[in-house]
Image (cartoon, rainbow, N blue to C red):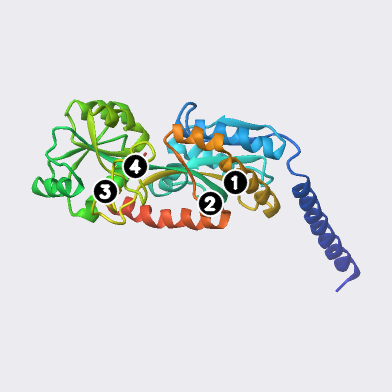
Amino acid sequence: MTIARRKLLHLGFGAAAAASVARTAAALDYPTRPITIVVPFAAGGATDVLARVIADAMGKSLGQTMIVENVTGAAGSIGVSRVARAPSDGYTLSIGTLTSHVLVGGLYKLDFDLLADLTPISELAYEPLLICIKNSLPAKDLQQLIAWLKANPGKASVGIPGAGSTGNLAGISFQNITGTSFQFVPYRGDAPAIQDMMAGQIDMMIEPSSNFTTQVQAGTIRAIAVPAPTRLFSLPDVPTTDEAGLPGYYASIWFGLWAPKNTPKDIIAKLNSAAVAALADDSVKTRLNKLGQQVATRELQDPAAFAAFEKSEADKWWPIIKAANLKVE
């Protein structure tokens, strides 16, 4: 090896070592400036409100301001893409849901990898869906509903806020598990669909539970079952699907926090610690419960466990999307 080549390699190794030392120092000092949390949905929605609650609590732990920025479009994928391409320094984070961080991977042709280009920090919260029906439907419980659907194949109408939505996929999964069939009726959101269900124009919906709480309590529609292992705080009399005779049929919208891939482990650890502390705060729990959300289990607040869960959700929902040939342009 020539002297010039040895000198060049020495300089290369030295530069790499210096860069490593710089990254380590940056991680130890982190954070030294405000942190941006990118919300991939419009202001005022459930994800946006959750982001602002979490940002306030985490900012106090980290000793820095956390700025919430809304970057909307393409079911959340535009905002997620921005974070996937951001520097891996912990100053640009992504908050999102099952839809924005899993389902879009099956619905859209993305120019980034949802599972590889982001590093999970923590699951934050979740909201079980709720199976609701119009009052005039002749079914008093889940087993009677399934029996009625089987006796009337293809006749029932189920409201959804668009093809590929969580409710659409939960409905397809319900059909697959129960051997039933029904028609999906797309709406511009859950609110107009609920109005039509109250008026008896559609038969059924499977959507986030907070959408239905007021109407169920008022008796204008009926809740049949919660597709989750535990009952809802807001509607404690509604049985779970396990209790109602359809064990293992679960569907919920969950919320999490991510950083770009290759973010230093020390920074991920600091962000995770701040998120865990925020979720343990009673005032944060109360505010999330008012949104219809429940704090993520302590297990899924761990980055590795959350990463495994996210992968399992992709393995669950992507084949359903493919089999149903669902595409969103």
- Name the outermost residue toward the bottom: 1
Q: Are dots 1 and 2 in contact, CB under 8 Å? A: yes
- Sooner in the amino-acid sequence: mark 2 or mark 3: 3
Read off the residue under disc 2.
298
What residue is rendered at 23% in x and 29% in y? 219
Q: CA distance from mark 4 to mark 1?
A: 24 Å
> What kind of element bears circle 1?
helix
- Sooner in the amino-acid sequence: mark 1 or mark 2: 1
Read off the residue under disc 1.
276
Amino acid type at image mark 4: Leu
- Sooner in the amino-acid sequence: mark 4 or mark 3: 4
On the image, which quarter does residue 224 sit in?
Answer: top left
What residue is rendered at 27% in x and 27% in y? 218
> Pointer 1: residues within 10 angstroms few (<14), some, or many (20+)?
many
> Pointer 4: residues within 10 angstroms few (<14), some, or many (20+)?
many
> What kind of element bears circle 4?
strand
Q: Quadrant of the C terminus?
A: top left
> What kind of element bears circle 2?
loop
Q: Are dots 4 and 3 in contact, CB under 8 Å? A: no
Q: CA distance from mark 1 to mark 2?
A: 8 Å
Read off the residue under disc 4.
129
Front of the two marks 4 and 2: 2
Q: Which mark is residue 172?
A: 3
> Pointer 3: residues within 10 angstroms few (<14), some, or many (20+)?
some
Q: Is residue 127 visible?
A: yes
Q: Tell me if 184 is positioned left or right of 281 in this view.
A: left
Q: Residue 144 placed where, x, y %?
A: 15, 47
Amino acid type at image mark 1: Val
Q: Is residue 40 visible?
A: no
